Image: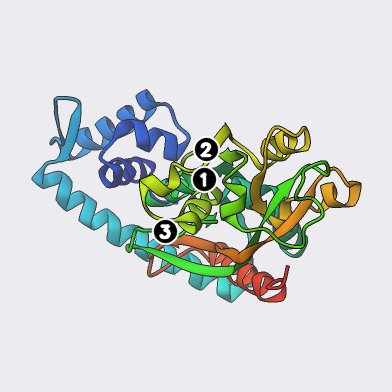
Amino acid sequence: MADRRLQVFHTVARLLSFTKAAESLHMTQPAVTFQVRQLEETFNTRLFDRTHNRISLTDAGMRVYEYADKIFELYAEMDNTVREMTGEISGSLTIGASTTIAEYMLPALLGDFRTQYPDVSIHLKVSNSDGIVSMVESNAIDLGVVEAPVGNKNLVVEKCRDDRLVAIMSPNHEFADRKAVSMEELLNYPFICREEGSGTREAIASYICNSDECKSKMHIAMELGSPEAVKGAVETGMGISVVSAATIQKELRLGTLVALPLDPPLTRPFSFVHQKQKFRVRVIEELLDFARNYCEANKSA
């Protein structure tokens, strides 16, 4: 309902990038530039200074940005108020999740949510934890679900539940009959790990130690971009790994992998992360409440 030109300008001003704004708005960069120029023509003044491939707000642009903030906050408040009066829950949401969560946790949560709210359209973006936090920071997604600590103190982080990590190996591995294994013992074998930026890899690195010298003891045989790829490499005997216990239920039933608890145990949080906003459209609030209840009911999962 709000002026499209103002929405586009507000996104560019917040990100200080036409390219990032185009990605966030699912538009082409020329279309974003056109909308901003139209707004500049309306006010008969430049809203951005463009120098050396960088942009900054002019004094007029800063004033327009401040008013745009107030306009969109009032719009969200109005939207919430009317929807509370009518009881309508509809709209579109974009959720981002790290790979493990997207593949093994979110399908059940989002399936139940869509059953209860069939008029809500949900889009899912998948990346590693660092990528998801970046999307939240740029407002490219409404809600992120990550498997690693979030360093940005300007974001809201709500813990969902703890996830238990276990060591995995092929049934032919010499440790396959053990009851538990230490990380120190695992470091003597080729290690299959996730890529840099993965929450799983960060949790393992923190678990081993914080010094580069200590981390260098890992004999990394492969770096792979998904839990499925890691499991496949371990099943063929190319090395061992540490993964979320939630990702290997099928393999344990089929007997293609063996899982051992780590001694001492290793857990990491699954958390929701979103922007601090006084007013959000009601559908986002409903999803957050639904997700919190889901996490409470599945804490032991």
Residue identified by numbered label 3: 150
Point 61% across, 45% down: residue: 99
Q: Earlier in the sequence, mark 3 or mark 1?
A: 3
Indicate the quadrant where residue 256 lies: top right
Q: Nearer the viewer, residue 43 or 23?
A: 23
Q: Residue at x 65, y 45 (%)?
A: 241
Which image quadrant: the C terminus? Answer: bottom right
Can the viewer see residue 288?
A: yes
Crowding at mark 3 (Cα within 10 Å: few <14, some 14-19, many 20+): some
Amino acid type shown at disc 3? Val
Along the horizontal axis of the image, is 226 left or right of 74? right
Q: Where is 164 relative to 15, above or below?
A: below
Give the amino acid type for the residue marked by disc 2 in the picture: Glu
CB atoms at circles 2 and 1 under 8 Å apart?
A: yes
> Does 245 sit left or right of 90 as displayed?
right
Which residue is under mark 1? Answer: 198
The picture places residue 189, in percent across and down from the top left corner, at 62, 40
Front disc: 2 or 3: 2
Q: Secondary structure at mark 3?
A: loop
Q: Residues within 10 Å of mark 1 (few under 14, many from 20)?
A: many
The residue labelled by disc 2 is 195
- Position in image of residue 174 (x %, y %): 77, 46
